[in-house]
Image (tube, helix red, strand yellow):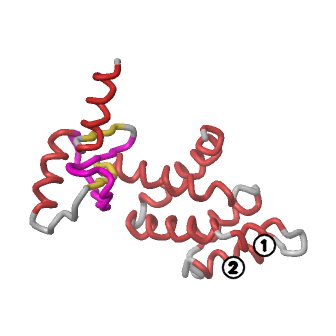
Amino acid sequence: MAELATIARPYAEALFRVAQSGDLNRWSELVRGLAEVARLSDVAALADNPKVSPAQVVDLLVNAVKAPNDAAVRNFIAALVENGRLSVMSEVAEQFEALKNANAGSADAQIESAFPITDAQLPELVAALERKFGRKLNANVTVDPSLIGGVRVVVGDEVLDTSVRARLSAMQTSLTA
C-alpha cells in the first residue's frame, strides 16, 4: 500500500536520524518489538478507546518494549499515538530496516530452498548471492518443498528464481504459446 508507506516514511526517517546517534541494532530490535505489539488487536482497540488517554497508551507501549527510561523512545511512541498512526508501525519498522541496511550497504535477502541448507552451504550461497546482487546480504532461509529443487531469492524488489518449479513453469509457458 503506497498510502501506508507514504504515511510511515517521515516517522521512519526521523527515527533513523535519532537512532544514528546511538546503537542502530538496539533501535532495530526496539522498532521490531514495537511493531509486534502494535499489530495486536487488543492494543489497537485500546489505542482507539476514548476512555484511555494517549499517555496511558504510551506508558503501555513503552513498558511493552522494555524502554521505560528512554526519553527518545517515549517521544517517538507519543508522536505515533497522538497522531493516530500506531497502525502504520509495521511499515515504519520495514522502512527503518531498509534505511539501516542502505546505510550499511546491505540488504535483507529472503532465501527459499527446496531442501534444508546446511551450515557449511549457507556461507557459500550467501557469498555467491552477494556477488550477484552487489551488496552485503542479511540472509533469512526458509524451506519450501513446493520448489521441488533449487532456490528462490528475494532481495528488495529483485527476485532470482532458480527453482525447478520456475523452470517447469517457464517450460510449460513456452510449450503452450
In the picture of the structure, the residue carrying the numbered disc 1 is: 46
Residue 91 lies, with reference to residue 122, above or below; the image says: above
- At 29% from the left and 22% from the top, the residue drawn is 174
Viewer-closest of 107 and 100: 107
Q: Is residue 40 above or below residue 139?
A: below
Q: Amino acid at mark 1?
A: Leu
- Residue 97 as seen in the image, left or right of residue 53: left
Residue named by callout 2: 60
Is 135 in the magenta? yes
Query: Is 170 located above or below residue 177 in the figure?
Result: below
Nearest the viewer among 133 and 101 is 133
Quadrant position of residue 78: bottom right
Q: Which mark is residue 62?
A: none
Percent position of residue 14, x then y: 55, 52
- Which is nearer the N-term, disc 2 or disc 1? 1
Do tag 2 and tag 1 residues touch (Cβ < 8 Å)? yes
Q: Where in the figure is residue 138, as x and y percent of width and height? A: 28, 56
